[in-house]
Amino acid sequence: MEFHLSDLAGKYLLTTMTFAPLVGALVILMVPRGQNAAMKWIALAFSAIPLLLVWIPLFPLAAVAAVIFGYLGVAHGKTNHPDGHQHQHQ
C-alpha cells in the first residue's frame, strides 16, 4: 500500500483533523521548560492543520461567490447599485 501526502486531504481527512492537534500536544511535551514562545508557535502550527484542510478547498467556492455577488467589484472601486448601473468611484 502506497501513501501520498494528498491522501491526508482525501481518505484520511477526519483522522488527520482529529490527531494533528494531538500530535502537536505530544511535540509540545518534548519542548524544554521555559520555551514558551516555541510552545505557542508549535501549538499554532499543529492547530492550523485542520483549519487549512477544510479552508483550502473552499477557496474556489469563495472566488465564485465573490464574482456572483459583486464583492470583487467593490474591491476595485466599482459598486452595483439597485438601479442596475455600475458606478466607478474615484
Image (cartoon, rainbow, N blue to C red):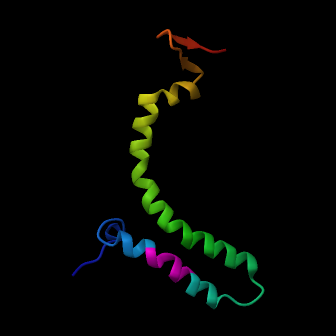
> Is residue 46 positioned above or below 29 on the image?
above
Q: Main secondary structure of the magenta part?
A: helix
Q: Quadrant of the C terminus?
A: top right
Q: How many marks?
A: 0
* Percent of width and height locating residue 58: 41, 50
Q: Quick one: which residue is furthest to the left in this view?
A: 1
Query: Is residue 58 located in the magenta-colored stretch of the structure?
Result: no
Residue at 33% x, 73% y: name it. 12
> Is residue 75 positioned above or below 39 on the image?
above
Q: In which quadrant of the rendered view does residue 67 lie?
A: top left
> Is residue 17 positioned above or below 30 on the image?
above
> Is residue 14 positioned above or below 60 on the image?
below
* Percent of width and height locating residue 5: 36, 70
* Percent of width and height locating residue 11: 29, 70
Q: Quadrant of the N terminus?
A: bottom left
Looking at this view, is 30 or 20 the one in front? 20
Looking at this view, is 32 or 12 the one in front? 12
Q: Quick one: which residue is furthest to the right in this view?
A: 34
Residue at 48% x, 60% y: name it. 52
Query: Is residue 19 located in the magenta-colored stretch of the structure?
Result: yes
Q: Which residues fall within the magenta stretch? A: 18-24
* Percent of width and height locating residue 65: 42, 36
Q: In which quadrant of the rendered view does residue 76 lie?
A: top right
Residue at 39% x, 36% y: name it. 64
Residue at 44% x, 75% y: name it. 18
